[in-house]
Image: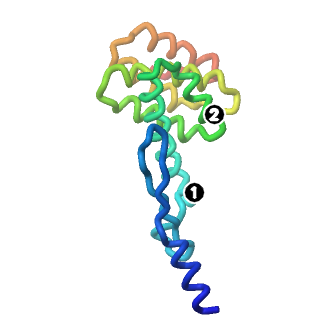
């Protein structure tokens, strides 16, 4: 029985290499359940939310190159995007250097407004307005500012 446990442990620690989309190779490394430093990211919601936001951002950029709309890319991840993930995604969009990436923030925000499952808060509005201001899209920023009332927020200027 001791040898059998060692064999199964060895199999669990072996790296599994599979082919991802577009012929890329990635590795799956199983995590040890008893090692807290290698715990699954689900234990820390901010960590997996940030990882999901990074993945969604990569899909948005890839989708833009393939002429996909922002909404169609986000619909793929609809069941996984939470309010925290949306904040992380909008933050990543605001910090992006390419102008075309930052302009996606309005599309992401419009999609989120249409998604009844997501509860928007004032931080979402702030991030979008700041991003639109960086892009000198003043009219869109003003329209988003006016939308605050529709969502039950009042402006403190």
Q: Residue at horizontal 64%, vertical 17%?
A: 150
Q: Give residue 84's position: percent from left, percent from top.
A: 55, 41
Question: Is residue 23 placed above or below 70 in the rendered structure?
Answer: below
Coloring basis for residues: rainbow
Q: Secondary structure at mark 1?
A: helix
Q: Give residue 148's position: percent from left, percent from top.
A: 57, 19
Report whether 96 appears left or right of 140.
left
Identify the residue at the far left of this view.
97
In the image shown, does 56 or 29 lie closer to the viewer? Answer: 29
Q: Which image quarter holds the C terminus? A: top left
Q: CA distance from mark 1 to mark 2?
A: 18 Å
In the image shown, does 98 or 115 lie closer to the viewer? Answer: 98
Q: Residue at horizontal 40%, vertical 35%?
A: 92
Q: Residue at horizontal 42%, vertical 34%?
A: 91
Question: Is residue 150 placed above or below 34 in the rendered structure?
Answer: above
Question: Is residue 86 placed above or below 98 in the rendered structure?
Answer: below
In the image shown, does 121 or 72 lie closer to the viewer? Answer: 72
In the image shown, does 92 or 4 lie closer to the viewer? Answer: 4
Q: Give residue 108's position: percent from left, percent from top.
A: 52, 24
Identify the residue at the far top of this view.
139
Report whether 24 appears left or right of 119.
left
Q: Earlier in the sequence, mark 1 or mark 2?
A: 1
Residue tagged 1: 42
Identify the residue at the far bottom of this view.
2
Residue tagged 2: 78
Q: Residue at horizontal 33%, vertical 13%?
A: 136
User: Dot 2: within a 10 Å radius of its alpha carbon, few (fewer than 14), some, or many (20 or more) residues?
Assistant: some
Q: Which image quarter holds the N terminus? A: bottom right
């Amino acid at each position: 029985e001791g040898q059998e446990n060692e064999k199964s442990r060895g199999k669990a620690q072996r790296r599994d290499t599979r082919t991802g989309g577009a012929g890329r190779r990635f590795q799956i490394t199983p995590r040890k359940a008893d090692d807290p430093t290698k715990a699954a990211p689900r234990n820390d919601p901010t960590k997996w939310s940030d990882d999901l936001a990074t993945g969604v951002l990569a899909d948005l950029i890839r989708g833009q190159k393939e002429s996909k709309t922002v909404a169609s890319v986000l619909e793929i991840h609809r069941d996984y995007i939470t309010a925290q993930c949306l904040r992380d995604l909008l933050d990543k969009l605001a910090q992006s250097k390419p102008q075309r990436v930052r302009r996606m923030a309005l599309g992401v925000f419009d999609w989120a407004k249409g998604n009844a499952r997501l509860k928007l808060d004032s931080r979402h509005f702030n991030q979008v307005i700041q991003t639109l201001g960086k892009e000198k899209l003043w009219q869109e920023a003003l329209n988003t500012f006016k939308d605050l009332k529709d969502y039950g927020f009042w402006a403190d200027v």
